[in-house]
Image (cartoon, helix red, strand yellow):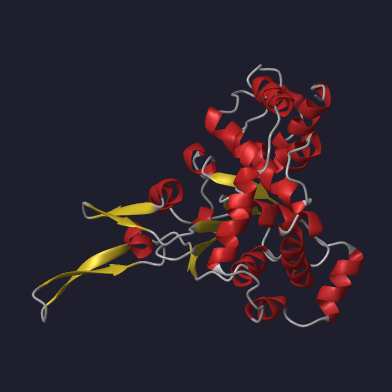
Amino acid sequence: MPAQPKIQSILDQLNTVIVGKNARVQDSVACLLAGGHLLIEDVPGVGKTTLAHALAHTFGLQFSRVQFTADLMPSDLVGVSVYERGRESFVFHPGPVFTQVLLADEINRASPRTQSALLEAMEEKQVSVEGETRALPQPFFVIATQNPHDQIGTYLLPESQLDRFLMRISLGYPDRAAERLLLAGEDRREMASQMRPLLSGDDLAALQRQVQAVHVSEPLLAYVQDLIAATRSGRWFLQGLSPRAGIALVRAAKAQALISGRDYVAPDDVQAILPQTIAHRLVPVGDAGRGAIEQVRAMVEAIPLP
């Protein structure tokens, strides 16, 4: 497909900065091509923020970074109206959310009140400030990083906000060869800031239209419904996936298929992105002894392929 060489050049450039994490880099690209928001969860220092910078630069998008802290207020995010004596009126000063890519760094260090200020922006691509609704630039992505919730000074993200993220990924520690490159090479954050944009706004819109046009067969849709029904059975999870989560799963699978150079979704595409797309929306049954991702993989093994 014509899109494949362009996507491959994006992956190649990102992999020069985020070394040894090709699968997670591909997940990130699939998430943005599908028009979704990305949550990167891991311990500090493994490259979460660097990946977010690299994605914004490579996709050629305007971006803002907000360091979420305990004292961050909603107005610090969306903006505020200030009275200007020269104009004898209130003038709105937009906050950093008025951008194409918002890097919400360590999002779970902010208070729940500030976290919730992102909800309307993520879902509706607009914000309401002082009774007036203001549209955000298009496209609009949130790339959020968060530390594990058991670390000091973190707040659990509410389920309603987790559900707004198309994918949640974890980078993990690098293998020995990749870590050697990191130790011996130049600063990766500096490399990310010097990346050249590989897409224009029109290029990105065209790729996203191609994602939407990827074909999904009836047997494949039945397979997705089988997976959704399994999450609701009570065997693996306390509560199943919503219809919105099912739609997100199909959208992510379409992006995965396009990256693989196909114009149709295969079962492998669904399985490749399934844990990243649904695990953060699910709570495993307590006596299973497994986390959500392991539980998703066990469930997949029990569902027959179409």
Residue 18: which quarter of the image? Answer: bottom right
Residue depicted at x 74% and y 32%? 296
* Residue 208 as seen in the image, left or right of residue 267: left
Residue 239 lies, in percent from the top left, at 59, 24
Q: Is residue 81 above or below residue 141?
A: below
Asked whether residue 13 is in view, the answer is: yes
Q: Is residue 220 above or below residue 145?
A: above
What is the residue that sits farthest to the front in this orientation? 2
Residue in front for this viewpoint, 6 or 66: 6
Q: Is residue 245 above or below residue 97?
A: above
* Residue 245 as seen in the image, left or right of residue 297: left
Residue depicted at x 32% and y 61%? 75
Where does the N terminus fall, quadrant-wise? bottom right
What is the residue that sits farthest to the right in this orientation? 177
Residue in front for this viewpoint, 117 or 125: 125
Residue 83 lies, in percent from the top left, at 15, 72
Q: How many marks?
A: 0
* Residue 5 as seen in the image, left or right of residue 283: right
Residue depicted at x 59% and y 68%? 56
Where does the C terminus fall, quadrant-wise? top right
Asked whether residue 42 is in view, the answer is: no
Residue 176 lies, in percent from the top left, at 90, 65
